[in-house]
Image (cartoon, helix red, strand yellow):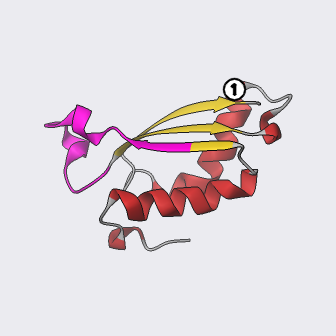
Amino acid sequence: MTENKNIETFDELADIIRSRLNELEPVTLDIIDDSHLHAGHGGAHGGPSHLTVRIVTTRFLGLSPVARHRLVYDRLQDLIPYPIHALALDTKTP
């Protein structure tokens, strides 16, 4: 996977997330930096760390919300807890 200590900007992190989640063939993929909403929080220092990922894909058809989240987390697990401190997921089918 990626050397996490070299990720410094939201754009760098978003590119990594996007490349990994493209395996799920998303119809829609939005990656939102919510870090500014957590100013002063212990995980909010050192760059983007609080993110929302909205993903719509047919790969989620027939899967429970927990199973959908697992598909996403499996691809991003080495990015947690750094550089991603908190990750909100919105996983839908078309």
Q: Residue at x 70, y 35 (%)?
A: 68
Q: Amino acid at mark 1?
A: Pro
Above or below for 24 versus 51? below
In this rendered view, identify the residue nearer to me: 87 or 34.
Answer: 34
- Picture coordinates of residue 49 (x, y %)? 33, 48
* Side of 66 relative to 17 (left or right): right
The relative height of residue 47 versus residue 66 in the rendered view (above or below) is below
Mark 1 highlights which residue? 65
Residue 32 painted magenta: yes
Residue 49 vs 1, above or below: the answer is above
Give percent across and percent down for residue 72.
63, 45
* Residue drawn at x 39%, y 50% as measured from the top left: 84
- Residue drawn 36% across the image and 67% down it: 7
Count of picture labels: 1
Residue 65 sits in which quadrant? top right
User: What residue is shown at x 77% (from left), y 30% (from top)?
Assistant: 94
Quadrant of the snapshot with the N terminus: bottom right
Which region is colored magenta? 30-48
Other-residue count near label 1 (Cα within 10 Å), few / some / many at <14 / 14–19 / ≥20: few
Query: Does 41 sit left or right of 32 as displayed?
Result: left
Say what secondary structure mark 1 lies in.
Answer: helix
Q: Position of residue 88 (x, y in %)?
A: 47, 33
User: Which picture quadrant has residue 76?
Assistant: bottom right
Asked whether residue 70 is drawn in magenta, I would say: no
